[in-house]
Image: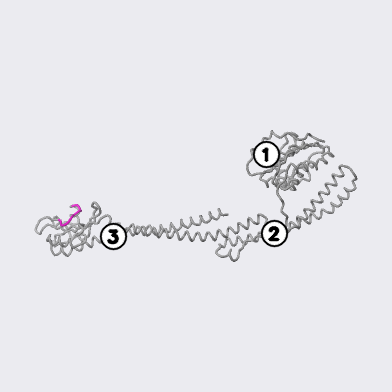
Amino acid sequence: MRRFGRSLRWALIKAAVAGTTMVALAFLIPLGMMVQQTARDRAFTAAERQAAALGPALAITTDQDAINRALASTDAGAQGRMAVHLPVPAGTPSGGGPDGPTIGEGRAAAADVATAGGWGRPFTVAVTVAVPGGYALLQPVAVDTGRTAVVEVFVAESDLTRGVSTAWLVLSVVALGLVAISVLVADRMGNRIVASASRLAAAARSLGAGNLAVRVPVEGEQADGSPEELREAGHAFNTMADRVVQLLAAERELAADLSHRLRTPLTVLRLNAASLGDGDAADATRHAVAQLEREVDQIIRSARRAPEDAPAVEVGCDAAEVIRERVGFWSALAEDEGRRWQLAGAERPAPVPVQRGDLAAAVDALLGNVFRHTAVGTAFSVDVLATGCAVIVLVGDAGPGYSDPTAALKRGEGHGGEGSTGLGLDIVRKLAESTGGDLALGRSAVLGGAETRMRLRTRSEEAPPARAGKRRTRGALFQK
């Protein structure tokens, strides 16, 4: 459940990070580009103001000393970033362009200066040209009729990006702050959702473990901040748990009533068995009737007892001991019917993680199928194979075998023949699967009839598959 909680919280956090990042980028990238363009425009605007500051001086005079003093009075001129391209003196036939002397450090090419001057045309629009290290702003200024001077202001590359890095840093910090806030909000929401889901999962595990009284709190703490869907799931879980309790109670009552009805025919059987006299067959019949009566009484007591009042049962028994006992019980009936039988491999202990009564019922079901579905006098055998991680019980006979092994394993279809329900094999299959093992049906390699293999796992590691042709040496010969 902790892994589920972490994965859910990480999913919410990643979704919040992705959503916030997309929104932040959608706003901050255009904003950053706008800041960069603003810095560029600010630099050229400042250069235009510097160039415009010399306009009045040029309109009054073109004396080089006066222009030089005016140039030095500006910030750009004091920094050596401004120059004035004067026109030729009046009366000189040069077209009125700025072909005169240059005051200050000029960086623009003569052709660019001539283009900006307009060769006598009344242009007043500034021209920007690229020069080494930045740009040159060329501002034409009309000196008099037909003559134009050009003011050059150098704009360094660093001026175009001044303050942009700081702006990007501030915007990045803002974006990271938004992402961090969204992560905190998603984590808080995830905590609430995970807490609600954890309570629901814990209640489901507890119900699966047999605690029928567990319920999910859907009011108070559960309702505080929990999603509506999880509260509805909690209501549905509580309704299901109530229904399970009702069905189990009805099932216990039905099992107790049905088992109680068997007491009347059992009483008749017990009286008839008492009148059989002496003999092995009579003793075996009375023993079977007494055991059947004990089993019916146990079923009634178990059905009437509430699940929470059931006594703790230690899981685990010796499969070899149980199999010896059950084979010994069925051997009396086998001798009466003239069946040869043998038991092999049950000399050594074979512990399995199942209850003794459940294993005895499974062995009885396997041996009972042999007596019910084979002719009188048909031989059978029981083998116990203990491996490193499993105990395998093989029950074979010399009968006709399984006509359809797949159908025989289906509950309700049975071994075959009249009166077969398939419940015996279903009991064996469920017992084997409860340990992680399995039940397999096939043909006996020794007796030629049906063979049922029940594999009970004793630990979690996989065991290497046993070869069908190799078995342990039988511990007992065929007996009569």
On screen, residue 38 versus residue 181, left or right, reads left
Q: In the image, residue 126 lies at what x, y percent?
A: 22, 59
Q: How many neighbours does mark 2 have within 10 angstroms: few (below 14), some (14-19), or many (20 or more)? A: some
Disc assigned to residue 387: 1
Q: Is residue 412 above or below residue 342?
A: below
Which mark is first along the chain, 3 or 2? Answer: 3
Q: In the image, residue 17 lies at what x, y percent?
A: 46, 56
Callout 1–callout 2 Cβ contact below 8 Å: no
Image color mode: one colour
Closer mark to the observer between disc 1 and disc 2: 1
Looking at the picture, tell me which residue is in the foreground, 204 or 319: 319
Disc assigned to residue 245: 2
Q: Is residue 1 above or below residue 323?
A: below
Disc assigned to residue 449: none
Callout 3–callout 1 Cβ contact below 8 Å: no
**Which span is picked out in magenta?**
102-109
Which mark is first along the chain, 2 or 1? Answer: 2
Most frequent secondary structure within the magenta stretch: loop
Residue furthest to the front = 348
In the picture of the structure, the residue carrying the numbered disc 3 is: 41
- Can residue 8 be seen by looking at this rendering? yes
